Image: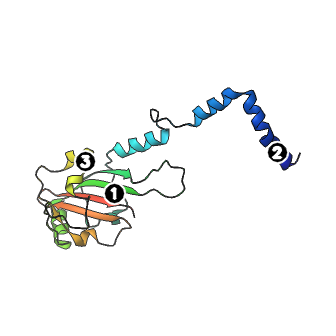
Amino acid sequence: MSKRVLVLGAVLGAPVLLLVVPGAVTAGYLALRTDSALPPRCQDSVQAEEARVRTDRWDPPEDLPGLGDYSEIHWQSRAKGDPCSRVPGPTDWAYQGVVELRPEDAQALAKRYEFVAYDPAVPPGYTSDRTPAHVWPALSPFLPPEPRWLTSRAYDELDTSPRWRVGYLDVERGVLLFMLDDH
């Protein structure tokens, strides 16, 4: 049987089938419909991954140069788009994290990239919504109490990564807060 006969039979037979089995149309619609009360599995998976605080070492290390052999890291990622969309193309991601540095590495980082006092009243124009005030809630417990943040445009704009980077360093407590965005 030729492909044309099969396609023609399928096209002409579909209306007859719809008349014979109207319940199948309703069932098919309900099966394909996305209900806001029952999120699709992909969305559940994305939400679970975004809520998870990771402690595995940052890879690639070029995204966060000069950290040395840090003792701890806590980080999260969030989709900037809809990774469950059926539209082809990549989804960009945002990342935030808190790194506990060795004292000598925190001092070397501050010196090498000329970190200066961060003034929350006058944030640099290039950071916009990527300031310590915008830390994701699950990462807040890993920040030091009353941090004395320093910032460095040289560190943020260092061309070692394809991601936009903003870093805030508390040298006294040996903590780096980072925010990365795909672009």
Q: What residue is pinned by disc 1?
A: 58
Q: Which of the pair 108/69 is nearer the observer?
A: 108
Could you tell me which quadrant the C terminus lies in? bottom left
Q: Which amino acid does label 3 sit on?
A: Leu
Q: How crowded is mark 2: few (under 14 residues within 10 Å), some or many (20 or more)?
A: few
Q: Distance between the residues labelled 2 and 1?
A: 56 Å
Q: Do the residues labelled 2 and 1 touch (CB within 8 Å)?
A: no
Q: What residue type is labelled 1?
A: Trp
Q: Which amino acid does label 2 sit on?
A: Leu
SS under mark 1: loop
Q: Which residue is drawn at 36% across and 65% down?
A: 163
Residue 168: percent from left, percent from top? 20, 61
Q: Residues within 10 Å of mark 3 (few under 14, many from 20)?
A: some
Q: Quadrant of residue 63?
A: bottom left
Q: Which residue is drawn at 46% across and 37% down?
A: 39
Instruction: Say which label, 2 or 1, has the lower sequence index.
Output: 2
